[in-house]
Amino acid sequence: MWALTLVSLCQFLDASVANVALPHMQAELGASGDAISWVLTSFIIAGGLATPIAGWLSDRVGSRRVFLGATTMFLAASALCGAATALPEMVAFRLLQGTAAALMGPLSQTIMFDVNPPSKQAGAMALWGGVAMIAPISGPFIGGFITDQLNWRWVFYINLPVGIPALGVMWWLLPSRPLVRRKLDRWGFALIALGLGALQLLLDRGQERDWFNSWEIIIEMVVAGSCLWMFLVRTAASPSPLFRRELFTNPNFVSGMVFMAALGVVNIALSATLPTFYEQVLGYPVMTTGLLMAPRGIGMAITMFFVSRLVRRVDFRAPIAVGFAIISVAMLMMSHWTLDMGFRTIVVASFVQGLGMGLIFTPMNLAAFGSLAPELRTDGSSLLGLFRSLGGSFGISFIVTMLARTGKVAHADLSAHLSASTLPAVDMAGFVAMGQNAGGGVMAMLDGEVTRQAAMMAYVDNFYLLAWVMLALVPLPYLLGRKAPKPAMFSR
């Protein structure tokens, strides 16, 4: 379990650890600002393409072989990313790394469940869930620290001293699930892979391309919608679909996918956008930004530790509902943030948010994943991970778009109120009369401060909106069945 936890830590960290190192990569690899973003996009797209096939590979080839092979490929790709000398090489190696990570995620959760008896499955899910939730939050801080102290290449090299010993332990001890003669639905896989790839591109590049004013985004939307619709039709009609139909007749599991998407919005999307807020709006350095992200992880670790024991004694729906309520309160606290607030205000709100997220993940996994028969677990884990990632992608795209649009509106409103009466200490007419050379610098400083104030207003509006979204989710867990069935373990 500890070896599995270590390689899972490397896998989940690599989804966000490279974010803060992008400017350093851009300079050394000679890439443009738009092109360097493919270092992140390629990893995400590869994950979306490979995740749906994880269940079939596990059944046909064997979970042990697939997991060990994927871990070996992940570590080799990490070494190649660290040694890359040009952007095309880096993107190719990140595609390889993302493919391996997409296979490792579902299998690691499945193995955690399989190797533990029912009495210990809550604790195992808390351990795995802690890594899955806290690692993306810690990524920017760890990436910034490594980049500052060593260089950006060690963001990838650091996986090797952690992953290689863990791989050796798993080679020695890891069991395998029974093999299943299962036919691959090639058309189904092609449809969902193409649909998810187009959807990820649409979400990643939508704001940059001004959404539906761009033919690229329109084409990606049509491809994504068409392929995913045809995939659903084929899943309903095919005698051997890519994902077994029993998954979609389990109400707890279907609800779990929805809640995982909502959790992805809060965890992954905020983890990706808050560092930018701390650095660009509040002006904190990278290391301070990383430290300000830590309280969320601490809060999650605390509640995950206790909730694994709590779910044995109480209705599993109660911690989920309370978790969403706490997140709503935390987002409401964040909607009162200001530019002159102190560290304590940020730390308290972030810690409270982490407490809420920690209450949701373990009982939701037990309700959704624990209600599945053993042979469905790998497919189920793939879908849960896929929906968590999609929720994060939707959340990032939505937040970035809303920030851009509400920021423009706020900038226009604030600018309209700049006058001699609102700024008595600034002789605006005099600076304008001086011309571009003399007064341009002062006017640029004023515009920069207006932009910063507008950005703060945009973030506050988004926090307030997310508070209401989380509050709306509070009663929904009670639509689930009161108790999830507990299927037997595999015999070994």
Image: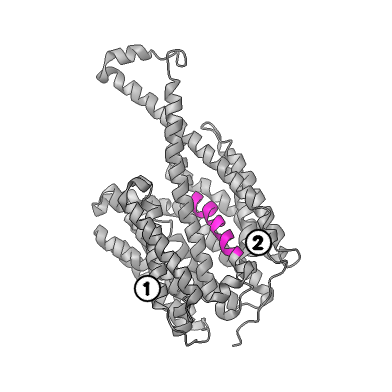
Q: Is residue 238 left or right of residue 357?
A: left
Q: Amino acid at mark 2?
A: Phe
Q: Nearer the viewer, residue 68 or 487?
A: 487
Q: Secondary structure at mark 1?
A: helix
Q: Relative to 185, does residue 382 appear above or below in the rendering?
A: above
Quarter residue 306 falls in? bottom right
- Residue 302 percent across, percent down from the top left: 64, 56
Q: Is residue 280 left or right of residue 492?
A: left
Question: What residue is drawn where x is 45% and y is 40%?
Answer: 403
Question: What residue is drawn where x is 52% and y is 48%?
Answer: 293
Question: What residue is drawn where x is 56% and y is 77%?
Answer: 376
Question: What residue is drawn where x is 47% and y is 59%?
Answer: 390
Query: Residue 82, which numbered label?
Result: none
Which region shows up in magenta?
A: 255-271
Q: Amino acid at mark 1?
A: Met
Residues packed near mark 1 inside 10 Å, few (<14), some (14 to 19) or many (20 plus) = some
Quarter residue 329 falls in? top right
Query: Residue 73, which numbered label?
Result: 1
- Residue 200 percent across, percent down from the top left: 40, 58
Q: Relative to 387, does residue 73 appear above or below in the rendering?
A: below
- Residue 287 percent across, percent down from the top left: 45, 46
Tell me the quarter of the image containing the N terminus: bottom right
Task: Using the numbered discs, state the Cα–Cα distance from disc 1 to disc 2 in whole angstroms.
Answer: 32 Å
Q: Nearer the viewer, residue 15 or 219?
A: 219
Q: Secondary structure at mark 2?
A: helix
Residues packed near mark 2 inside 10 Å, few (<14), some (14 to 19) or many (20 plus) = some
Tell me the quarter of the image containing the C terminus: bottom right
The reply to whether residue 222 is visible in this rendering is yes
Which residue is the site of mark 2? Answer: 305
The reply to whether residue 160 is visible in this rendering is no
